[in-house]
Image (cartoon, rainbow, N blue to C red):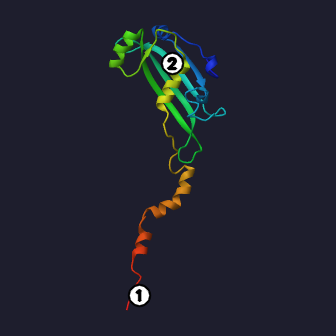
Amino acid sequence: MRDKDRRTATRFDALKLADAGGELGGEVDPAQLPRLADRVVAGEGAARIVWRIAGGHDAQGHPALTLRLDGVALMICQRCLRPLAVPVAQETALLLARNEHELVRLDVEEPEVVLAGEPLDPLTLVEDELLLSLPFAPRHDEAKCGAAAVAAPVAQDADKPFAKLAALRAPHHPKN
């Protein structure tokens, strides 16, 4: 399944997918996901996330999904305010709860539990994982950042910030 945007995604029964050991997959531009729209930049085709959801069971036999994300999200560098390609390579195991009672019980034991009593939207799961995995304040490496070139002259004076003050305080009496 290829997803161009949220409207083409189809909901799925996660418990049936887990029992069958099935897979779903697609591709999405992170800028098309509503909760990410203010954190990412529209990528003109460059920013794409390939996602895969595989059903199965954990070691204790609980139904589970494995969500795998690979690709690139374009964000704004918080130093230079230019686009920054942020690689995404994330794999998350999600336990499935059949009802609220099971959700509460499993949530105490496991960090990632999803209520699967109703059909799930795969792009909502993708969006949730992207929100958790993308940096809050993305920045280029200092050597590659456009702001580093502007800040470099200031850094030279930053080594000795009080050197100029010391020169002002020094007495200027001529030696006799």
For label 2, count other residues whose C-alpha is less than 10 Å away and answer few (under 14), some (14-19) or many (20+). Answer: many
Q: Nearer the viewer, residue 120 or 173?
A: 173
Q: Is residue 38 visible?
A: yes
Q: Residue furthest bottom?
A: 176
Res. 86 mark: none
The answer to whether 116 is drawn above or below residue 73 in the figure is above
The answer to whether 78 is drawn above or below residue 174 in the figure is above
Mark 1 element type: loop
Percent position of residue 121, x then y: 54, 16
Q: Which residue is mark 2?
A: 53
Percent position of residue 123, x then y: 55, 20
Q: Nearer the viewer, residue 104 or 54?
A: 104
Quarter-wise, where is residue 96 in the image? Answer: top left
The CA span between labels 2 and 1 is 81 Å
Q: Residue at x 39, y 77 (%)?
A: 170
Please tell me whether mark 2 or mark 1 is closer to you in this view. 1
Q: Is residue 2 visible?
A: no
Q: How many numbered circles does the render carry?
A: 2
Percent position of residue 77, x then y: 55, 43
Is 108 left, or right, of 82 in this rendering? left
Q: Residue at x 36, y 18 (%)?
A: 107
Q: Nearer the viewer, residue 55 or 174?
A: 174
Is 171 left, or right, of 8 in this rendering? left
Query: What quarter of the picture does the C terminus occupy?
Result: bottom left
Res. 174 mark: 1
Which is more N-terminal, label 1 or label 2? Answer: 2
Q: Are marks 2 and 1 in contact (CB under 8 Å)?
A: no
Going by the numbered disc 2, the residue's amino acid type is Ile
Going by the numbered disc 1, the residue's amino acid type is Pro
Q: Residue at x 53, y 28 (%)?
A: 70
Q: Residue at x 48, y 60 (%)?
A: 155
